[in-house]
Image (tube, rainbow, N blue to C red):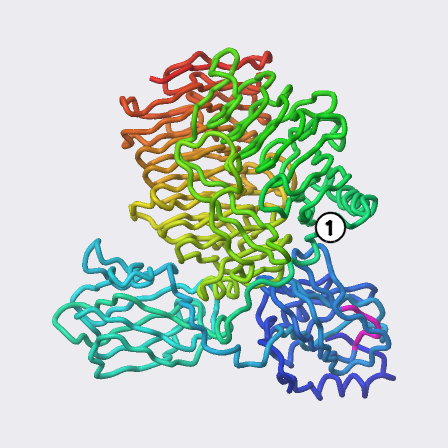
């Protein structure tokens, strides 16, 4: 304990003996969010006054800082929360001036409350805002000592401790499940939480037995539904636990008779279990389904529709062109070089003509709001590489769609690399895909577009174009692939390096937002088979219009629980531009659900959860967002379907379009696997799955990730597949009859040596692996590159690996050693010449076998 001058002894004694009693405030606040959470501070006075003591719920412990200005104390709420009130209970060493601030990421702070003339005691402040992190930033002390707080309480926005009405959604759906035993391999624990009343869990025929589910985070549990098979539990308890070890009984049931029953309960926990003590039959326990309802995700229905948020800029042709151009230029200045910035923008143009050029920076998407591309015309939608010395190989994460361009000088420039889709565009002239000065570029993707003049890739290493009409194509570098493109050059691989398919086997264009009068709607295009040319050649793109009022319009700060509540209610999801921190998995369980993002909306899973899972259902459409791996390893970032399920979805497949996945670069993200596909017939139409080779949080043992994409479903089609830098297989394919049209890959830059990059006795990991069990698989226009910057002597035995079977075929394969940093010994299996040396010359295989 510190000593103070005698003159302040009475005040000190009062501060030490009259410890304040702190209770929940008597007003309609939401839940207490901060208690027991991770806390940090700029300093501590000594080991007896750590930061965590201000968040422990005890008024006999406190945090105190060093005796200097400024000082801060902050708490991590675990996920982004809506904030309603903060209560600070000061010890005698209080602040006369301080701020209460919030942050999404712990770096960029927003002021919620500024206090001057503080007089200590208990400060209770209503606040409005959201954040994962909340801090007190002290700027002026009242005494010669530091800052000292008995308690710092952060409350959510809400209506008090009730947490709202008991929700109608099932918080346990598809949650990780376990059990004391299973009767056989066909009755696993997970079957009781899969939403399917035709599958069940059953136990061994003994007492006691238990079944439990992980809800992903502590929840306030209000009701549990049990649907018993004939082998029911007569006596059992329903229990909850915060840690899966110490259990609290929520309900005790004796003399039950099976069937379906619902039990209202009160309590909280992350884990819920049914603990059976007496069986109703001579068999084990068997449950078709267990439903868990929580507070805070139910009550009144969530509204659909609404405004699109502050980072959606909607332009009207009646606005002066100079005013429109000024807004575009201002955003571009902010975003031009913000490769790992936090800004996200959508620029939308109502039908009409605009005398503007839309320079398009990072995390900026440009949209025409007409039903057809011809409804909006601008003078340019442009990307160049001046910010990076004329090198366009890092022009990522931007997009344009659904408008026409009448270029000032007859040519529009779109010099991009990965994750920069060009969709539903009509260029009334030529299109240049290279930067000024013709520096390197590493794109790219065009779909459902019409280019009246020639397309000039020039220095582009590779490019994929699908279902479009072009006036010509000037040249190839390594891999130019076309499917369903009118005007495409004929296949010439290996020289010129063109690979052309007359049609695309199956395709469906990305959903897009448009205006019908004054009402926003989303057009969901129809599936096409053996498509060639644009979908709007003979009138509006066929499809189904969905009003925006059928979408939950999400804004940054919304919780995963609310998103899941919206989905359970039957709404689609529209993410407005911004960054979304998820403490639970987004569960997409309803057929034909549309989940789309604007302005590269970014989802960041927290605590090692999977960002999104899609059930094994028909017709889900995912489009236009980025998943950024969080700092705690996630087993997967995006899952499509359910393991082991093989349902025919060919009439109405799941589509994944312009959904990008990133591990590292923004920070040290981690994930075992980026994308896992279980559902049969899934279409993956343009993705970039990237383990970062530059940016923050990058290193062989830092942003760890084994696999980019693993496919278990049958009849899965990938069109425009970009996967890079993963530490084992970038792509691993287990399903039958898979097809890939265009594949671009770089192997990881950063293995420290050959020993670190071995697959057993095989040197290196193939970029693209087809499992030995597969009988039928086919790929066209596929390239892998190596540039081992840590050890240029590393070798890779095979760029591609596949079983040698008549049904497994590849066309137009190549591998390249960039600048001689590394060596490929073969292209595919043991076929193909080595690729090595500073000349950067590809080794190619025209067809295999």
Residue 35: x and y, percent?
Answer: 59, 73
In terms of secondary structure, where does tag 1 sit?
loop
Residue 543: x and y, percent?
Answer: 47, 47
Q: Quadrant of residue 436?
A: top right
Extreme-left residue of the structure: 282
Task: Tell which of 754 and 405 is nearer to you.
Answer: 405
| Left or right of 659 on screen, residue 212 | left
Q: Give the range drawn in magenta.
A: 93-99
**Residue depicted at 36% across the width and 52% down the height:** 617
Viewport quadrant of the N terminus: bottom right
485 over 708 or under it: above or below: above
Task: Tell which of 480 and 357 is nearer to you.
Answer: 357
**Residue 651 colored in magenta in the image:** no
| Left or right of 232 on screen, residue 129 | right
Residue 208: x and y, percent?
Answer: 23, 72
Q: Is the magenta stretch mostly helix, strand or loop?
A: strand
- Residue 817 visible in the current orientation: yes
Task: Tell which of 254 and 359 is nearer to you.
Answer: 359
**Residue depicted at 49% across the width and 25% down the height:** 482
136 over 428 or under it: above or below: below
Viewport quadrant of the C terminus: top left
| Left or right of 62 on screen, residue 286 | left
- Circle 1 residue: 316
């Amino acid at each position: 304990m510190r000593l103070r001058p005698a003159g302040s002894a009475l005040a000190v004694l009062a501060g030490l003996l009259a410890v304040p009693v702190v209770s929940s405030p008597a007003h309609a606040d939401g839940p207490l969010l901060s208690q027991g959470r991770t806390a940090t501070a700029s300093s501590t006075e000594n080991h007896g006054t750590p930061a965590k003591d201000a968040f422990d719920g005890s008024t006999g412990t406190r945090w105190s800082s060093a005796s200097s200005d400024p000082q801060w104390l902050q708490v991590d709420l675990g996920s982004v929360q809506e904030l309603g009130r903060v209560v600070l209970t000061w010890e005698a060493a209080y602040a006369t001036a301080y701020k209460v601030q919030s942050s999404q990421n712990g770096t960029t702070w927003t002021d919620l409350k500024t206090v001057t003339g503080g007089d200590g005691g208990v400060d209770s402040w209503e606040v409005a805002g959201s954040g994962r992190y909340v801090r007190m930033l002290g700027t002026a002390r009242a005494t010669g000592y530091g800052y000292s707080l008995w308690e710092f309480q952060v409350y959510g926005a809400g209506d008090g401790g009730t947490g709202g009405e008991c929700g109608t959604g099932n918080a346990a759906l598809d949650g990780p499940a376990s059990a004391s035993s299973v009767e056989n391999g066909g009755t696993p624990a997970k079957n009781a939480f899969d939403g399917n009343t035709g599958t069940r869990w059953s136990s061994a025929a003994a007492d006691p037995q238990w079944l439990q589910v992980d809800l992903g985070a502590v929840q306030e549990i209000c009701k549990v539904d049990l649907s018993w098979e004939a082998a029911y539990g007569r006596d059992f308890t329903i229990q909850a636990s915060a840690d899966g070890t110490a259990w609290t009984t929520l309900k005790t049931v004796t003399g039950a008779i099976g069937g379906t029953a619902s039990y209202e309960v009160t309590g909280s926990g992350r884990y819920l279990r049914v603990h059976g003590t007496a069986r109703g039959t001579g068999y084990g326990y068997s449950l078709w389904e267990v439903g868990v309802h929580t507070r805070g995700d139910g009550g009144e229905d969530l509204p659909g529709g609404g405004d699109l948020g502050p980072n959606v800029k909607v332009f009207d042709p009646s606005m002066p062109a100079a005013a429109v151009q000024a807004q575009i230029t201002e955003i571009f200045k902010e975003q031009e070089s913000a490769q790992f910035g936090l800004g996200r923008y959508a620029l939308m143009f109502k039908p009409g003509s605009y005398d503007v050029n839309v320079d398009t920076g990072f995390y900026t998407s440009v949209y025409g709001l007409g039903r057809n591309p011809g409804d909006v015309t601008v003078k340019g939608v442009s990307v160049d590489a001046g910010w990076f010395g004329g090198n366009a190989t890092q022009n990522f994460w931007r997009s344009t769609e659904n408008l026409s361009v009448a270029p000032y000088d007859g040519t529009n420039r779109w010099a991009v690399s990965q994750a920069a889709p060009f969709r539903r565009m009509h260029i009334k002239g030529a299109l240049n895909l290279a930067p000024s000065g013709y520096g390197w570029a590493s794109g790219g993707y065009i779909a459902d577009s019409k280019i009246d003049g020639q397309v000039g890739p020039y220095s582009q290493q590779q490019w994929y174009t699908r279902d479009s009409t072009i006036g010509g194509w000037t040249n190839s570098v390594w891999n130019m692939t076309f499917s369903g493109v009118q005007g495409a050059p004929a296949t010439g691989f290996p020289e010129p390096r063109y690979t052309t398919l007359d049609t695309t086997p199956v395709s469906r264009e990305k959903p897009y937002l448009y205006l019908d009068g004054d009402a926003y709607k989303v057009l969901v295009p129809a599936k096409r088979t053996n498509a060639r040319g644009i979908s709007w050649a003979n009138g509006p793109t066929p499809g189904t219009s969905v009003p925006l009022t059928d979408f939950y319009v999400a804004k940054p700060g919304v919780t995963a629980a609310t998103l899941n509540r919206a989905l359970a209610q039957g709404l689609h999801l529209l993410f407005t531009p911004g960054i979304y921190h998820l403490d639970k998995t987004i569960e997409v369980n309803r057929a034909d659900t549309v989940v789309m993002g604007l302005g590269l909306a970014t989802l960041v899973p927290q605590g090692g959860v999977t960002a999104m899972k899609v059930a094994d259902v028909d017709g889900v459409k995912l489009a236009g967002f980025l998943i950024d791996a969080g700092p705690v390893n996630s087993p997967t970032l995006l899952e499509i379907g359910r393991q082991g399920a093989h349902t025919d979805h060919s009439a109405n497949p799941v589509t994944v379009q312009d959904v990008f996945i990133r591990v590292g670069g923004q920070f040290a993200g981690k994930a075992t696997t980026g994308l896992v596909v279980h559902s049969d017939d899934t279409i993956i139409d343009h993705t970039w799955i990237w383990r970062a080779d530059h940016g923050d949080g990058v290193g062989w043992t830092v942003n760890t990730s084994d696999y980019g994409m693993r496919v278990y479903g049958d009849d899965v089609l990938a069109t425009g597949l970009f996967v890079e830098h993963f530490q084992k297989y970038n792509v691993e394919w287990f399903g039958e009859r898979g097809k890939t049209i265009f594949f671009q890959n770089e192997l990881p830059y950063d293995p420290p040596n050959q020993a670190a990059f071995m697959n057993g006795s095989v040197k290196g990991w193939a970029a693209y692996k087809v499992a030995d069990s597969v009988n039928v698989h086919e790929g066209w226009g596929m390239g892998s590159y190596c540039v081992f910057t840590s050890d240029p002597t590393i070798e890779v035995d095979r760029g591609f690996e596949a079983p040698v079977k008549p049904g497994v075929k590849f066309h137009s394969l190549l591998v390249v050693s960039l600048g001689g940093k590394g060596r490929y010994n073969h292209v595919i299996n043991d076929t193909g010449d080595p690729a090595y040396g500073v000349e950067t010359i590809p080794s190619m295989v025209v067809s295999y076998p």
